[in-house]
Amino acid sequence: MEQGDYDKAVTVFESLVKETPGNFTFVTGLVEAYQQTEAYSKADSLLLNTLENTRNKPVLEVELGYNKQLQGKETEAQALYNKAIAGIAENPGYASGVARTFQKYSLLEEAIKSYETAQEINPANRFDYQLASLYGELGDYETMFQMNLNMLEQGDNQTLNAQRNISRFITDDNTNLANQTLRKVILTRMQDNPDLLYNRMLSWLFIQQKEYDKAFIQEKAIAKRSGNFSGITTLAIVAEQNEEDTLAIGILEYLINETIDEEQRLFARQKYLELKLKSANPEELKDIDAQYASLLETYGKSALTLEVQADYAHFLAFRFAKKEQATNLLEEALNLPLNNFQEARIKMELADILVLEERFNAALIYYSQIQKKLKDNVIAQEARFKVAKTSYYKGDFEWAKTQLKVLKSSAEQLIANDAQDLYLLITDNTVNDSTQIALKTYAQADLRSYQNRDEDAIAIYDRVLKDFAGEKIEDEALLAQALLFEDKKEYQKAADNYLKILESHGSDILADDAHYRLANLYAAQLNQPEKAKEQYEQILFNFADSIFYVDAQQKYRRLRGDSIN
């Protein structure tokens, strides 16, 4: 606020206080305005006058004490603070208001003393959550964690607050003082009381630190003692989400072998196959086919195994060159008693296979049926996006744009982003090109990629780059081809493409993509951390609006060795 704004605030609050002299909000508002204009004596007078006519003296004594402190009158301030705390000893009901006022002015030790005084007078007054928060803010992590763990151990209505309190101070850096303190406190408690709570807390801490292998050890201990494997299931999903596929597969293998819950085992076997497929070479596909068949033989073909049937069909069509068998499996599934969402899941997979076979019009029928059945649902939006993508594959760019215009404002952010990207691709490459040859050629390469014909796609992108060098389509082709190079583990070729984008299109819309993906390659695949930092810096300094900004910031700070909240 500017000085003139505070002068206006003084005028407004003086009028309000004059009309309602005892209104606490107006009084403190006027005090703050006086303080901002350095009219401390007026604030003193106002507070003293109000003190004479109020029963809530301790809170105003803190306000008056702080006003004295602003004037450098430390002795007077401390005397008023002590008087306010003494007021709590007479009436513990003042504790919350006094403590919050101290906290407002960062007088944390006084706030702690306020709560502790109330608890001493009446032990039924519990301020554990507030005290734990204050000790944390003071940097006394051990006391803070001890108090929060006490609350968790009691399992009372403060459990959620205790969890929030602990989360505030933990980062993903295992050298962070708070992280180390929490680990030490938990391990000490475990020696005296081997409660599963402490295994769960250690597991949670390791997950925050992305030490999933250590979390796995704790989750196995929990499962062994309790028979509850839900933590194992969750950990497998978290490990996968954080690109720890090898560990996730190991966790799922453990779950498959140890759980007695058949629903959990079904989930684990399905997820296991999904992860194995991500890195499977052609020689391993026959075994995966056999495992899918075994899974359906064990659990049967019903609505309960619908996801397995859909996954198996996708595998057969897209990875195992058995499109007819995939289609038969899905058409058979449609005869099961399915709800609208389950039916949409199967029809979406059928349509996807029809696109794979370049039977575009038949695919569009299924996508449209899903849209009509599940209006306004995210699945309907996904189907609409696939209508747009299918129309784009077949060269009907105008109809694709019509669908994408609607989806650009979707509440589902991923769909909205994909729609925006495809809309811009089509718009940028059709405005000044009546023949649309460049975009049609690019779309053919995109389709080959969808069909897992990566070598064909790379060759067509090469043709785009040769025939339409310097045109708008060039950076899109370089990026799409680079992603295929990454899939094939040809990382240097991918890096070369990203560098070409930055050299020729460094101020265009894909520049942040190129910087970010190049940085990731340097960091994770090419072992050039300094170059990775340079690329992340480009995003941080020049692309503040980029969707990669937050992730780039975190990865940059990790490379630099910073602690990350």
Image: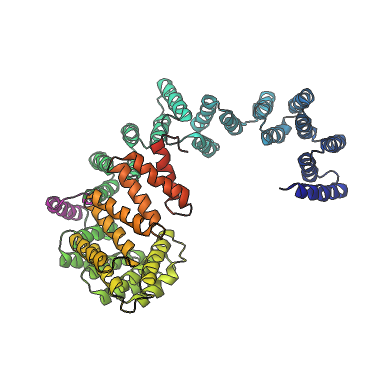
Does any portion of residue 370 appear in the rendered image?
A: no
Residue 280 inside the magenta-drawn segment: yes
Q: Is residue 89 above or below residue 207?
A: above
Q: Residue furthest top?
A: 192
Evaluate whether residue 385 shows in this view. yes
Please name the predominant secondary structure of the magenta segment in the image: helix
**Residue 396 position by quadrant:** bottom left
Q: Is residue 131 left or right of residue 171?
A: right
Query: Picture coordinates of residue 505 (x, y %)?
Result: 37, 59
**Which residues lie in the magenta part?**
277-298
Residue 506: which quarter of the image?
Answer: bottom left
Does residue 255 appear to the left or right of 20 in the view shown?
Answer: left
Q: Nearer the viewer, residue 526 or 18?
A: 526
Residue 335 point in image, percent of width and height: 25, 69
Q: Looking at the picture, how far across and down is residue 22, in whole percent?
A: 84, 43
| Foreground residue among 65 and 237 | 65
Residues 368 and 530: in front is 530
Q: Measuring from the top left, give residue 143's x and y in whole percent.
A: 54, 25
- Is 391 above or below relative to 452? below
Q: In the image, what residue occupies the spot 21% across and 52% down?
A: 488
In the drawing, does residue 62 fall left or right of residue 476? right
| Image position of 361 with respect to 224: above or below | below
Colouring rule applied to residues: rainbow
Q: Residue 480: within the magenta?
A: no
User: Residue 478 sits in which quadrant?
Assistant: bottom left
